[in-house]
Amino acid sequence: MIYPNNWIDYELIDHGFGRKLERFGEVVLDRPEPSATWKKSLSDSEWNKADAVFSENKNQRGSWDKSLNDWNISYPFGDSEVIFKLSQGSFKHPGIFPEQAENWEFINQKCSELISDGITPKFLNLFAYTGGASLTADLSGAEVTHIDSVKSVVNWARENAELNNIDTIRWIVEDAPTFVEKEIRRGNKYHGIIMDPPIFGLGPKGGRWKLNRDLPKLLEDAMKLLDQDNRFFILNTYSPQLPLPELKKLLSTIAGFPDNYESNTLGLKSTAGKELPLGNLVRF
Ligand SMILES: C[S@@+](CC[C@H](N)C(=O)[O-])C[C@H]1O[C@@H](n2cnc3c(N)ncnc32)[C@H](O)[C@@H]1O
């Protein structure tokens, strides 16, 4: 398993019994975590220190037992930092997937290599949420295109960009597979692509995204968009129905997908060192 090591404002305090206890800056949240199928390590009195607890109802929606004001956290990035606005909503996610910091470092390394070869990286973030990969790619010197189908989520990413004085990202509210098809027809190419597709999603015009149905075509299309010589690619999947060996079998059938790539479980480590697996990571 790989996990990020550089966080200061984020800490996985404990996990177990289908929950995780985390510190985001000064704020401690207790949220559902289906993959934490073991016992908690800390006592109830530690868990009861959470500032807010999320209870899930239906379709991953739910509510918090306490309302908190929006707040900011930062991630140390190179000589600088990336700032994120966090917020409670009707989903358990407060605006960041902390495990993704591992990919932000990978993006930074790949962009540096391209730049030292005299190439300005063109980077595409699909299913981009609040923009962690977009901001870090921009700060790494890339020309960034950010795609998400939900307008309010793209607005949140734009707010994050403003917090970081970034005004060079191309923001697009669109269904990711549709955008990729259009870019192929337009003959555009990218040096780097990251995709973190959900199990189910919605396009802005109501079309539906289904991971097990739609991933193979999207992967084939993404391979067509990548520059053949100077390129990097990151895929995350969080579906329990697609364990890593199955994902690798699928990748072996994708036209244009290379044979050599890194595959791993992406996760987080608790303060006491207990690992929490959070999904598959494939990258090259
Ligand atoms: C798992 S989140 C990605 C999190 C991201 N990796 C990060 O670290 O910030 C999935 C995102 O996909 C978006 N989404 C769902 N269906 C989509 C579609 N068909 N096209 C584009 N984006 C979609 C959702 O709005 C959500 O922001």
Image (spheres, rainbow, N blue to C red):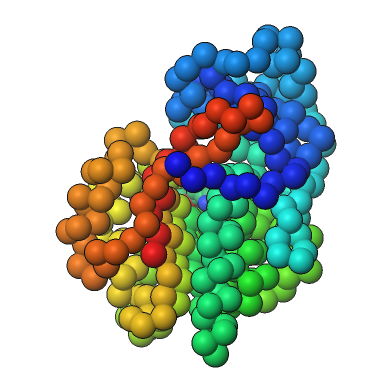
Tally the marks.
Answer: 0
- To which quarter of the image does residue 133 belong? bottom right
Q: Position of residue 61 (x, y in %)?
A: 54, 30
Is residue 27 positioned above or below 226 on the image?
A: above
- Residue 241 in the figure: left or right of residue 82: left
Q: Which quarter of the rendered picture does the C terminus lie within?
A: bottom left
156 sits to left or right of 80: left
Image location of residue 166, percent across then percent down: 73, 70
Residue drawn at x 22%, y 52% is 250
Residue extending furthest front? Answer: 273
Give the position of the N terminus as an image quadrant: top left
The relative height of residue 133 versus residue 66 in the rendered view (above or below) is below
Whole-percent x, y for residue 273 in the image: 59, 30
**For residue 86, what is the image quadrant?**
top right
The residue at 56%/69% (across/down) is 109
In terms of depth relative to the viewer, which is nearer, 268 or 97?
A: 268
What residue is at 79 percent from the left and 47 percent from the top? 72
Residue 29 position, x and y percent, is 70, 28
Q: Give the residue furthest to the top.
A: 44
Q: Residue at x 69, y 46 (%)?
A: 7
Relative to residue 203, is residue 214 drawn left or right? Answer: left
